Amino acid sequence: MKSRVYKIENIAVIMNGLDNIAVAKAFINKGVLIQWSNNIIKIKSNIPAGHRFALHNIKKGWKVIQYGSPFGISKGIFSGQLVHDKLIREFRHTQRQLELLARNNRVFAKIDKPGHIPDKYFYGIRRKGGSIGTRNYYILVPTSLCSSDMARRIALSFDVDPVIKKKYKNIDGIVAAGHTEGCGCNDGDIIDRLVLTLKNTISHPNVGGALIIDLGCEKTNKSYISKFFDGLSKTGKPVDYLSIIESGGDQAAYKKGKVIVLKRLKSVNNIKREKFPLEKLIIGTECGASDTFSGITANPLIGATVDMVIGSGGSAILSEMPEMIGAEDILIKRMVSKEVIEKYFNGLKYYTGLAKKLDISMNGNFVPGNKKGGLVNLTLKSLGAIQKGGHSPIVDFVDYAQKISKKGLTIMNGPGNDLESMTGLTASGANVILFSTGMGTPEGSLIVPVIKIPSTTKVFKSLKDDMDFDSGVLIKDMSLLNKLGEKLLAMVIKVASGEKTRSEIHNKRSFQIWTAGKLSL
């Protein structure tokens, strides 16, 4: 009996015409025959879903390619053979090669004139100075770990009060930015990053008012931090201070803090949503608990949506520096000037220099779950991760928590750690976050709506209470990418206009500052 031959598009995914490997859509048994172009590939061993097999013999020393870019050097791989880390040596450009690429790059990415997508608007909240919010929070901000508990207790007393919720329906929540920083540390970068993150969180258009709380004896007490926070008065929102020691201790400060918050809620509640074009959106991009399909479905889908927002004059932020390792050359070619390239190199040097000082390998970003999910190495993970940034030119590079200042795609120097990354994206100005996940992380952000996009329909269904949008349909038909991107954009518009995401419904409000001097991967 003649063996059945499967068309490759029905059984595997090829991401780019230059690729010499394919990704199994579902489990492929040993011996299966697959037609690819004019060739018949015989599968040499069982291929689990999400794992890769060679499209032809890849001789020793040849590059192993996906997304049109190399991620490994073959040690000798046969057609139809499972591609795994024992058969390849990881490919990466050296620092010297990247510097030569940057130096010789005379054709910088060009920014197309934005074209507004007709009839696409969202309903946001106008703040003084012209920034547009998608939410309206009152936030309690401790200046150090010593006042974080106080901030949480005061916030919780209001946030769970049904009378308060009913009376102030335009307030999305009364929340605390609790953290572990601000004292018991060196001056310099550690304090500077804390102050910048807190200041830019308070000034975020999703915040309608804030109470800043200190203990009184820490490095970042009111007398120190107010010098940096004075400009917050220009935001037009009520910003108050509370000192625990000055108030007479814990209980007295708690009562005083509640009085301050209660006095401010009426004005914070006094907002209305207005119609705005997509150019007022700033999309933060994030991925967590990645699997092999993250870079095939969810990340490219986010990238397609980001390109639509940027094409309408909006902005987006790509971060997670450890998840760009091995893909630096692709990003450099998309940068609009030597100035942006130089900023990017300085960011890379900061990260790699810190790793060297701490004797830590950047490969720590490649975790067992990534490998189990079908990823082969960190370079391959990075090639999939940067898909979240779409194909738009890269207009700027900013430090962690630094506000973006240019329309288009900006890279933020941030960690791969989900919670620290989202906190930085928020401080940099993101008013909606698109978060891809392979295995299903449920975390959200303190003040910004997070849309969770699992890479497979299986995860979408099994974690239906935590996930928002199913990108897994792309596994069956990659030609649906742009159509699905339009559907995701429609969800972004609804969420930006006030519709709650799953993480918001479940009050998943994470806030974690990336401490300077700590190498988060």
Image (cartoon, grey):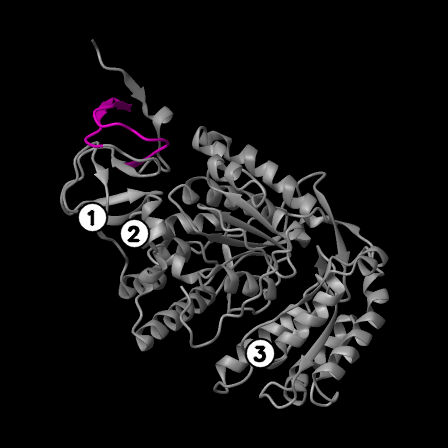
> Residue 497 placed where, x, y %?
72, 48
Element on which disc 2 rests: loop
Q: Which residue does the image show at 45% across and 47% down from the upper left?
A: 387
Image quadrant containing the N terminus:
top left
Q: Which residue does the image show at 67% across and 47% down from the upper left?
A: 495
Above or below, 282 against 142 in this view is above
> Residue 277 placed where, x, y %?
71, 48
Element on which disc 3 rests: helix
Question: Which tag is nearer the camera, tag 3 or tag 2?
Answer: 3
Looking at the image, tell me whether mark 1 or mark 3 is earlier in sequence order: 1
Magenta range: 20-45
Q: For marks 2 and 1, give the CA distance.
A: 10 Å
Looking at the image, tell me whether mark 3 or mark 2 is earlier in sequence order: 3
Q: Which residue is mark 2?
A: 377
Q: For marks 1 and 3, give the CA distance.
A: 46 Å
| Kind of residue at badge 3 | Leu
Looking at the image, tell me whether mark 2 or mark 1 is earlier in sequence order: 1
**Closer to the camera in the image, 226 or 513:** 513
The question of residue 183 being in magenta is answered with no
Q: Which residue does the image show at 46% across and 38% down from the upper left?
A: 456
Say whether residue 405 is visible. Answer: no
Q: Which residue is mark 1?
A: 88
Q: Which residue is mark 3?
A: 145
**Closer to the camera in the image, 279 or 286:** 286
